[in-house]
Image: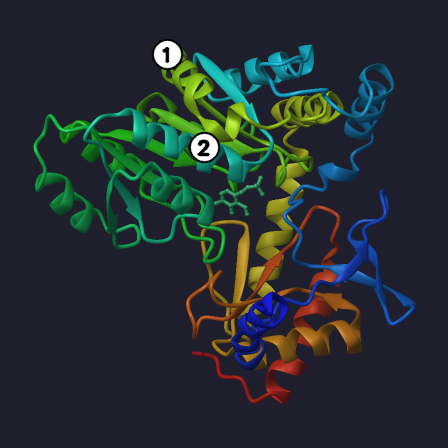
C-alpha cells in the first residue's frame, strides 16, 4: 500500500524547518472600516491595521464599486453560466474588454479570471503559436509568467534583472528574423523597482522582438488615468501586449491583456487558460469597470496614496529599520532571515495589532526575506508614525541590522 498522506506530509517538513511554512492570517476586512480588520485567532477576534494589502487604493470598499457589483449581481445573478464560448459571455465582459483596451489605447482587450490566468494562458499561447520562437524574460518576472513560458515549450532565456546589456547581448545572439518575445514587468512587486521600459522597447525594435509587459502593480496608480507605467511614459504603442489585473489597485478580481486586434484574437482562439474555464461573474466585471472609470476620472486616490507613501518613506529613513527606498509605492523592509522575519511580523501583530505578512522563499530568494509594506489612502499620518515606531522597537529588540 502506498501511504499517499505520509508522502505528501513529508514534503511539508522542509517548509516548517526553514520557517517558510505559510500560516494564513484569518481576517475580516470590513467594508468601510479600512485599514482596520478583525483578526481571528483561537476563537478570539482582535482589531488590527492591515499594512500589506494589494487593495492599494481601497477600491474594494468603494461604495460606487460595491453598488455596481450588487446591482449587476441582482440583475445577472452571481455566476456567468459558462465558458466564454458556451453561454458565458455577458454584456459586462464585452464592455470591460473595451474599457481596458481604451485605457491602454489598444485595439482590443481580453478578460481572464485572474491576472495569473492572463499571464499563464497568453504567454503559453504566444510561445506555442509563434513557430521557432524564443522567449527572453527578466529574472524577476512573476510565477504566472514563468509557468506560461514553461508550458509554451518555447526556447527560453533569462536576462539579469533590469540589465539592458545582458538583454542586448542575448537578443544579438539570435537570427534577427527569428520570433522573439521579451517578457517583463513594469513595477516589480517584491522590490518595488521599475523596469527601464523605454530602453527595452528600443532594444525590441532594434532586434525585431515582441514586447509583453505585466502592469499588474501599476494600473490604477501610475498615469493621470491609472493607465500604468507604459501609458505614463507615452510608450503604450511600443508595447505589443500589456497585461494587467483588476485585483490590486482596482480592488476587485480578474485579469486581462490588451493589444492589436489580431493578436488578441489569436489568444482568444488558442489560449487554453482562457477557453476552458468559466468566465468571471458579470457582477465582478461590472465592478471592475466601475473601478477603472472612477480611477480614470479622479486622481485624488492616487494623490492621497503618494502623500502616505512619502510620509512612510520619510519616517523610515529617520529610523534604524532597513527598507528599500524604491521609486514605487511598495516599501519593502529587508530582514534577510526567514525565522526573524516571521518573528518580527508576529510581534507586530500580537503586541501592536499591526498586520504585515512575512514574505519568504520562493516569493523572494533565501536571505532576502522581508516585510512588504503597502500603505493606502485610508491610513493616517499618525498610523504611519506608530507603525514606524513599533517597527523600530521590534527591529532593535531582535538585533536586526540596518544593512541586512
Ligand atoms: C506581477 C504579477 N503579475 C500577475 C499576478 C497575478 O495576478 P492575480 O492576483 O490577479 O492572479 C501577480 C499577483 O500577485 C503579480 O504580482
Q: Does ligand 1 reach within 8 Å of label 1's beta carbon?
A: no
Q: Which residue is mark 2?
A: 121
Tell me which numbered mark, 1 or 2, is placed earlier along the sequence: 2
Q: Position of residue 119 (x, y in %)?
A: 45, 36
> Quarter of the image holding residue 270?
top left
Q: Position of residue 110 (x, y in %)?
A: 51, 20
Question: Given contact means CB atoms under 8 Å apart, are the residues at marks 1 and 2 in contact?
Answer: no
Residue in the picture at 84% in, 25% down: 70
Disc 2, SS: helix
Residue in the foreground of this view, choosing between 172 and 194: 172
Disc 1, SS: helix
Q: Is residue 337 above or below residue 260?
A: below
Residue in the picture at 51% in, 15% down: 102
Is 154 left or right of 5, judged from the image as shown?
left
**Residue 319 shows in this picture:** no
Q: Which mark is residue 262?
A: 1
**Residue 170 shows in this picture:** yes
**Colour basis:** rainbow
Q: Does ligand 1 reach within 8 Å of label 2's beta carbon?
A: no
Within 10 Å of the Cα at label 1, are there few (<14), some (14-19), or many (20+) other Cα atoms? few
* Quadrant in which the N terminus appears: bottom right
Residue in the foreground of this view, choosing between 34 and 128: 128
Is 312 left or right of 49, judged from the image as shown?
left
Q: Is residue 336 above or below residue 188?
A: below
> Quarter of the image holding residue 202?
top left
Q: Position of residue 20 (x, y in %)?
A: 56, 72
Total numbered badges shown on the rendered structure: 2
Within 10 Å of the Cα at label 2, are there few (<14), some (14-19), or many (20+) other Cα atoms? many
Is 227 left or right of 130, judged from the image as shown?
right
Residue in the picture at 45% in, 58% down: 191
Q: Mark 1 or 2, which is nearer the eye?
A: 2
Q: Position of residue 115 (x, y in %)?
A: 54, 37
Amino acid at each position: 500500500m502506498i501511504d499517499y498522506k505520509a508522502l505528501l506530509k513529508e514534503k511539508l517538513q522542509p517548509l516548517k524547518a526553514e520557517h517558510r511554512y505559510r500560516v494564513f492570517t484569518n481576517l475580516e476586512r470590513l467594508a468601510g472600516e479600512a485599514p482596520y480588520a478583525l483578526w481571528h485567532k483561537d476563537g478570539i477576534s482582535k482589531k488590527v491595521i492591515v499594512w500589506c494589502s494589494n487593495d492599494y487604493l481601497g477600491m474594494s470598499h468603494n461604495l460606487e464599486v460595491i453598488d455596481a457589483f450588487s446591482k449587476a449581481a441582482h440583475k445577472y445573478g452571481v455566476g456567468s453560466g459558462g465558458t466564454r464560448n458556451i453561454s458565458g459571455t455577458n454584456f459586462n465582459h464585452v464592455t470591460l474588454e473595451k474599457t481596458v483596451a481604451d485605457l491602454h489605447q489598444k485595439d482590443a482587450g481580453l478578460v481572464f479570471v485572474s491576472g495569473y490566468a492572463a499571464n499563464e494562458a497568453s504567454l503559453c499561447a504566444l510561445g506555442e503559436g509563434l513557430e521557432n520562437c524564443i522567449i527572453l524574460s527578466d529574472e524577476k518576472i512573476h510565477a504566472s509568467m514563468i509557468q506560461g513560458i514553461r508550458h509554451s515549450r518555447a526556447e527560453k532565456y533569462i536576462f539579469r534583472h533590469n540589465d539592458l546589456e545582458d538583454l542586448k547581448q542575448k537578443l544579438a545572439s539570435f537570427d534577427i528574423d527569428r520570433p522573439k518575445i521579451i517578457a517583463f514587468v513594469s513595477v516589480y512587486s517584491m522590490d518595488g523597482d521599475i523596469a527601464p521600459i523605454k530602453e527595452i522597447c528600443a532594444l525590441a525594435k532594434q532586434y525585431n522582438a515582441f514586447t509583453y509587459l505585466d502592469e499588474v502593480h501599476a494600473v490604477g496608480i501610475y498615469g493621470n488615468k491609472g493607465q500604468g507605467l507604459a501609458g505614463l511614459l507615452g510608450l503604450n504603442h511600443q508595447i505589443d501586449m500589456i497585461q494587467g489585473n483588476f485585483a490590486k489597485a482596482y480592488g476587485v478580481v480578474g485579469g486581462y491583456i490588451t493589444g492589436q486586434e489580431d493578436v488578441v484574437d489569436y489568444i482568444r482562439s488558442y489560449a487554453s487558460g482562457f477557453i476552458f474555464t468559466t468566465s468571471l461573474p458579470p457582477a465582478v466585471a461590472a465592478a471592475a469597470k466601475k473601478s477603472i472609470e472612477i480611477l480614470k476620472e479622479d486622481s485624488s486616490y492616487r494623490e492621497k496614496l503618494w502623500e502616505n507613501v512619502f510620509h512612510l518613506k520619510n519616517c523610515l529613513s529617520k529610523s534604524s529599520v532597513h527598507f528599500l527606498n524604491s521609486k514605487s509605492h511598495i516599501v519593502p523592509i529587508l530582514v534577510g532571515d526567514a525565522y526573524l522575519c516571521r518573528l518580527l511580523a508576529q510581534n507586530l501583530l500580537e503586541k501592536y495589532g499591526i498586520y504585515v505578512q512575512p514574505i519568504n522563499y520562493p516569493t523572494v530568494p533565501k536571505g532576502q526575506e522581508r516585510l512588504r509594506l503597502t500603505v493606502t489612502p485610508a491610513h493616517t499620518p499618525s498610523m504611519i508614525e506608530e507603525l514606524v515606531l513599533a517597527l523600530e522597537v521590534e527591529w532593535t529588540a531582535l538585533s536586526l541590522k540596518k544593512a541586512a
